[in-house]
Amino acid sequence: MLRTLDANLNRIGEGLRLLEDISRFTLNDPDLSQQLKAMRHELLPKDQALQGKLISARQAEGDVGAYLDVDSEGERSDTVSLVSANAHRVQQSLRVLEEITKIPGQDFGMDWEKLKQARFTLYELEQRILLKLSRRDKTNKISGLYLILDTQMLGERNEVEVARQAIRGGVTVIQLRDKMRAKGELITIAQELKQVCAGAGTLFIVNDYLDVALACEADGLHIGQGDLPLAVARKLLPGDKIVGCSTATLDEAVQAQEQGADYIAVGSIYPTTSKTAIRPAGIDTLRQVKDRVSIPVVAIGGINEDNVAEVMDAGADAVAVMSAVLGASDVHEYSRRLMAAIGGKQ
């Protein structure tokens, strides 16, 4: 029984340490890191006499299961699979210890009810880690060409078909913006666009409307300074969804990052007729923001094939366009040319 106890305690310590390190160094999440560290110290034995017995009972060389592998055991395709494998490893070991401590006379200083509680706590921590990893992966896709699909600017053209053309041209993010339609109708359009974007590996963002973003399971939400407060949006969005915020000044950009924005849009960089009420930001503000924030920065406002190189040279991670692409006679071709110009500067 001591060998079983030793093996499972080792699995718990190793698995929790890996989860703790991912939370600390990959996700930079102090709360998750602290909870996992506290769990590790709470579960591992502190009694030196018991530790001595466990080490004495250990038979690593003679362990008949040491070299028994299954086909999928060595596969860790990404960080998500790494987290899942180690969380399940710890959960299974906790269940083993929980059952052992229920046997009369097996007193190892462990409480099976506390082991059970630790197992259920880890279920919740695993979910939080996986959601944050998914959110991080979405944030990392904020690069290249970001298309704002303004439905009023499309006229009679079909939103989904225009989106397909833009994606074929290299667009990496599509934001649906519609200030006119009823939300019931807009949700239907958003669901179609989400499906198209998901199939192409393109991020799909909804402008302004949290309820629409949730209803169509968009990858995220984009809000302006006068919309739903950023802290509220972050609280209401699921943990794997991203939120972006429009800014025009350095102070707004820094504040947006502090309040939980996953990316920020800075603009208007150049004069534009796409929106009636704009606030100028300019290239200098873009440079200042890029120097101060650690999240992706999207330049927006009046950007086209003629000036995109200047914007990328100023440090933008992505450029958001609306009229330049939607006003082109060939959306696919113009997107391709613009993306080529961006790619040459990345």
Image (cartoon, rainbow, N blue to C red):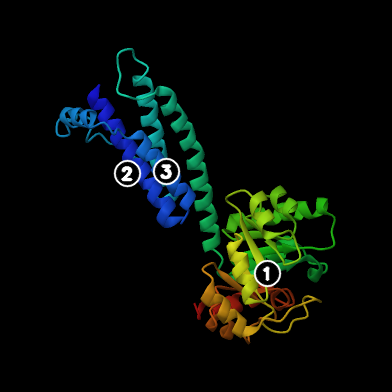
Q: Which mark is residue 74?
A: 2
Q: Are marks 1 and 3 in contact (CB under 8 Å)?
A: no
Q: Where on the picture, by quarter, is residue 280? A: bottom right
Q: Which mark is residue 246?
A: 1
- Whichever of labels 2 and 3 marks the residue nearer the N terminus, that label is 3
Q: Amino acid at mark 3?
A: Leu
Q: Residues within 10 Å of mark 2 (few under 14, many from 20)?
A: few
- Whichever of labels 2 and 1 marks the residue nearer the N terminus, that label is 2
Q: Is residue 225 left or right of residue 312?
A: right
Question: Callout 3: helix, strand or loop?
Answer: helix
Q: Residue at x 31, y 36 (%)?
A: 11
Where's residue 254, x and y in %? 59, 70
Q: Amino acid at mark 1?
A: Ser
Q: Nearer the viewer, residue 28 or 145?
A: 28
The residue tagged 3 is 36
| Relative height, residue 205 to residue 54 (above, below) | below
Q: Are marks 2 and 3 in contact (CB under 8 Å)?
A: no
**Residue 78 in view here:** no
Q: Amino acid at mark 2?
A: Gly
| Relative height, residue 233 to residue 165 (above, below) | above
Q: Is residue 339 left or right of residue 233?
A: left
Q: Residue at x 37, y 20 (%)?
A: 99
- Whichever of labels 1 and 3 marks the residue nearer the N terminus, that label is 3
Q: CA distance from mark 1 to mark 3?
A: 35 Å
Q: Residue at x 17, y 27 (%)?
A: 57
Q: Residue at x 55, y 61 (%)?
A: 139
Where's residue 128, x and y in %? 52, 45
